Image (cartoon, helix red, strand yellow):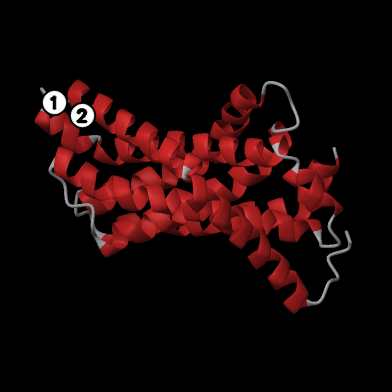
Amino acid sequence: MDDHSQPTPFFLRAILAIVWKDLRAEFRSLELVSSMLVFSLLVILIFNFALELDIKTRQSVTAGVLWATFAFAGTLGLNRSMSIEKDRGCMDGLLLAPVDRSAIYFGKFISNLAFMLLVEVFVLPIYSVLYNTNLFQPGLLLVILLGSIGYTAVGTLLAAMSVQTRTRDVLLPILLFPVAFSVLLAAVKASGGFLSNSELTDILLPINLLIAYDVIFIAVAFMVFDIVVEE
């Protein structure tokens, strides 16, 4: 059905079924999460060695390095997630199932978000030790959650679009980074504010922007996902 008129319990069960399928398949192989984690650690180590000689500069760019790590790892995860679905024929099966196409989007969005958050759980303590920075602040963790939601929301939509092409590995970053730039910029500003102990009034604006971007991106993806997968 494409008219978004399915009963709510059926719609939610369809979403949960897709999420459960993705999580169960991933925890059997750990192919996606392991590649994201290894890539994240490599990025962190490269930046750590590059900024090792200048402690002051390293502290001032912590927020930027952190979100660069999340963005690169998240893009890799989004690409692999949709590529696996496409290569195994699972996406065609989902599209043929008698469920609303938006349920497919929300199922993939939630599972991709779970993978990204799982990687961040491992990255944060390692990053804290290497950069000698306390990242376990409630406000900063909230920013990471909001930023991850916005990035994954638009990334899931664009990954579904690019997976149909032969150059999907190259096309997704080209499409995603310009669109998600606003989310990353607000996340970096808010994260930097918490790490530098700025006034709460200075941090509220980027946090409010993050919330607005999350709502807008999810709403837009909900409305156009059906068109994207049909193409």
Residue 149 in view, yes or no: no
Please name the residue shown 81% across and 61% down the image.
100
Residue tagged 1: 52
Q: Amino acid at mark 2?
A: Asn
Q: Is residue 148 left or right of residue 56?
A: right
Q: Is residue 86 left or right of residue 121?
A: right
* Quadrant containing the N terminus in the rendered view: bottom right
Please name the residue shown 42% across and 57% down the image.
145
Give the quarter of the image for residue 189: top left
Q: Who is closer to the viewer here, 164 or 5?
A: 164
- Decide: is 8 above or below 4: below
In whole angstroms, how far apart are the C-alphas of marks 2 and 1?
6 Å
Please name the residue shown 43% across and 46% down the image.
186
Mark 2 lies on a secondary structure that is helix
Please name the residue shown 54% across and 40% down the image.
180
Q: Who is closer to the viewer here, 99 or 44?
A: 99
Q: Amino acid at mark 1?
A: Glu
Residue 168 screen position, x and y as percent:
66, 26
